[in-house]
Image (spheres, rainbow, N blue to C red):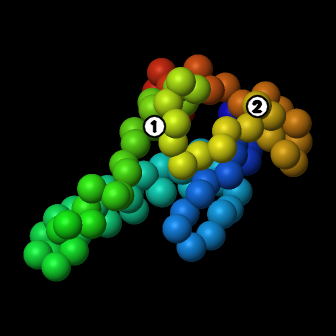
Amino acid sequence: MSCEHIIGLIYKTDCTEFVTLDGLKKHIAEQKELKEEFAKDEVYSQFNFRISVWELSEYGDRRKTTDLHRFNHCCDCGARIDWKGIKDGKY
């Protein structure tokens, strides 16, 4: 995957958007940071369990249900998405 392929739709609380592999990595980092911030605050700590944080390997595993709707092919160029490579950590 040498170019930026759209790998799926990410479902966030306020919007749904197309996501690339780099965008997915950024989303994972944001979710981890949000979960840590909620854990620190006493008022919001009770809502911390609702924030799901998945690893890149879990997004690549089709048996897992995540907030990503995976595409088999890129919407723009039609290239096949290598989910096995994403799951194994090649990218």
Where residue 12 appears, as percent x and y from the top left, is: 55, 63
What is the CA distance from the residue labelled 2 to the residue labelled 1? 16 Å
Where residue 44 appears, as percent x and y from the top left, is: 22, 74
> Residue at the spot x=39%, y=62% of the render?
30
Where is mark 2, residue-wise?
72
- Viewer-proximal residue among 44 and 4: 44
Callout 1 crowding tier (Cα within 10 Å): few <14, some 14–19, many ≥20: some
> Residue at the spot x=61%, y=54% of the render?
10
Amino acid of disc 2:
Asn
**SS type, badge 2:** loop
> Residue at the spot x=68%, y=62% of the render?
17
Q: As drawn, is 76 to the left or to the right of 3?
A: right
- Viewer-proximal residue among 1 and 81: 81
Where is mark 1, residue-wise?
56
Q: Earlier in the sequence, mark 2 or mark 1?
A: 1
Query: Is 62 above or below relative to 53?
Result: above
Callout 2 crowding tier (Cα within 10 Å): few <14, some 14–19, many ≥20: some
Where residue 56 appears, as percent x and y from the top left, is: 45, 37
Where residue 22 appears, as percent x and y from the top left, is: 56, 50
> How many tags in the picture?
2
The residue positioned farthest toward the right in the image shown: 77
- Quadrant where the N terminus is found in the figure: top right
- Viewer-proximal residue among 60 and 38: 38
Question: Can residue 19 be seen at all in this image of the molecule?
Answer: yes
> Residue at the spot x=59%, y=46% of the render?
68
Question: Can residue 4 be seen at all in this image of the molecule?
Answer: no
**SS type, badge 1:** helix
Q: As drawn, is 58 to the left or to the right of 7?
A: left
The residue positioned farthest toward the bottom in the image shown: 43
Q: As drawn, is 84 to the left or to the right of 30?
A: right
